[in-house]
Amino acid sequence: MLFLPNNAAKVVFFCYSAKSAVLLQCLIFIISVYSNQPMHNKTSFARSFLRYLRLCIATFTFVCITLLFLGVSWSFTMRIGWLAKIQFLPALLAFNIGVLAMLVMLTMLFGRIYCSVVCPLGIMQDIFGWLGKKAKKNRYTYSEEKRWLRYGILAVFVICLILGFAPVTTLLAPYSAYGRIINSLFRPLYDLLINALAYWERNADTYRFQAVDIWMRSVTTFIVAWLTLGVLGFLAWRNGRTYCNTVCPVGTILSFFSRFSLFRIQFDADKCKQCSLCEKNCKASAIDYKNHKVDYSRCVTCGDCTDQCRFDALHYRMVRPQSSQPQEQVDTHRRAFLVGTAVASAAALTSQAQMKVDGGLAVIEDKVPPQRETPVTPPGSVSHRNMERHCTACQLCVSACPNNVLRPSTDPLHLMQPVMSFERGYCRPECTRCSEVCPTGAIRRISREEKTAVHVGHAVWVADNCIPVANGDSCGNCARHCPAWSIHMTDYQTADGRTVQVPVVDAEKCIGCGACENLCPARPFSAIYVEGNTMHHIN
């Protein structure tokens, strides 16, 4: 569903396609300015350039991923969807060796720059931290690394990941936490804006915007998103990167590799005047200016410290080997590297109430979802077990679904993972969007032809809810609209002796799309509903 007008979409895509030319022009301008700088200003110029380059890349990543979860347009999603696939945890669960190798190599070269320019939750924390610095400058202080807490949380996360215990992994996954915040809290505001524009254009007799339904898909997910935003916002506003360097499992894994990064923040002790500005502006609390020490496992390479240093005592540069380094420290780093590699490898291998009116005459009662013994998971998810082991509940598939079929689960064992529910739409056979955007492999990519053969569930008829049985009126709506032709009408003898036409389901043909359940006129409970298959099969 395209929410942007065509002209706006063309502008966005033109800017995206022209990025190479823009970057080239910027590079030529920077080189020309740099070449005209005096020698004593070139170091400061280079530091500022690196910092602003990081800010530009982080802004691009943050804006694009936010637009992904807002569902701006499907064309935009297909162009920018790779940003979701290069997130660390989705790549780990999808066993994407190329992306994982790239991220590890990036960390080994430049430090934990992933947390500053790729992870949207880290960038969001930087925004809250920036607001905190506006309220009070020089607010941070150095603190020792809480290894017992970091490694304890990582151990719990890895165990739950191996066992497939979804509630813990979905709550701790940083990319997924950001997706839930945007999809649950800000997507309704975006839809409200679209509806306001659609209403205004309808009065102006133009129809570039299409009104959409605004409804709460899950109260549980809404509450979790609010709590996550509140806690992370408070921690980042008060103490900067507390979550990244204490709780986040991705930050802990990358910290193993960042200790060996080729480029690092380094002190020039002869120039340091002990002004403490570097420590007071380090949002990772990783700089001990008194001892001229930087904790590289927590440093996110933001450049704030070098930008604040007035005496040119801090430099982001290549590490030179030091023969005076104690042997004990080298052994500690080696053990940390081996443990980090083992942890990453083990984890990778295991890998609403809205009133509707019919013609302005009668109020249509909203449907109530049935109690399904087995939840219905999207085509491509293979099975409910595969979904719970790979899905991080980022809600990207929920945001991409144009038919309002996917919603977060409220089951405690599969908390916030997507399930199919057919009160507001059904899974159209020609739509494969959820499989195209899933970054973790929980929903594997399938073609339209493959989807029509995937049986995710089967329809079940409930006689007491059926209109011909209850009222004697003829219906047959489910049989007329079944895209798999798996329902036909047959005679049925009611308890009071009447003969009526009721649906009979051929379970071998039924693919579980939910068209019958969605289009059934019975209210509030449909007379026919879809029961999920434990393991999807293809006929």
Image (cartoon, helix red, strand yellow):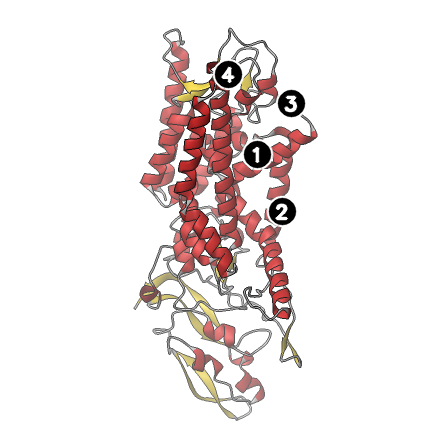
Q: Is residue 490 left or right of residue 187?
A: left
Neighbour class for label 4 at 10 Å: few (<14), some, many (≥20)?
Answer: many
Indicate which disc residue 314 carries: 4
Q: Which residue is mark 1?
A: 126
**Kind of residue at disc 1:** Asp
- In which quarter of the view is residue 24 placed? top left
Closer to the camera: disc 2 or disc 3?
3
Location of residue 298 with respect to 58 vertically, above or below: above
Q: Is residue 413 left or right of residue 440?
A: right
Dots 4 and 2: beta carbons under 8 Å?
Answer: no
Q: Hey, which residue is sitting farthest left in the picture?
A: 539
Looking at the image, is mark 4 or mark 2 earlier in the sequence?
2
Label 1's element?
helix
Q: CA distance from mark 4 to mark 2?
A: 39 Å
Label 4's element?
strand
Q: CA distance from mark 1 to mark 2?
A: 18 Å
Looking at the image, is mark 1 or mark 4 earlier in the sequence?
1
**Kind of residue at disc 4:** Leu
Q: Work out whether residue 154 or residue 323 is closer to the camera in this orientation and state it.
A: 323
> Residue 492 placed where, x, y %?
47, 88
Dots 1 and 3: beta carbons under 8 Å?
Answer: no
Q: Which residue is mark 3?
A: 138
Location of residue 319 with respect to 10 vertically, above or below: above
> Residue 335 placed where, x, y %?
38, 21
- The residue positioned 44% from the left and 51% from the top of the image is 14
Confirm whether residue 369 shows in the render.
Answer: yes
Q: Which residue is mark 2?
A: 226
- The residue positioned 42% from the left and 81% from the top of the image is 504
**Kind of residue at disc 2:** Trp
> Residue 379 placed where, x, y %?
39, 61
Dots 1 and 2: beta carbons under 8 Å?
Answer: no
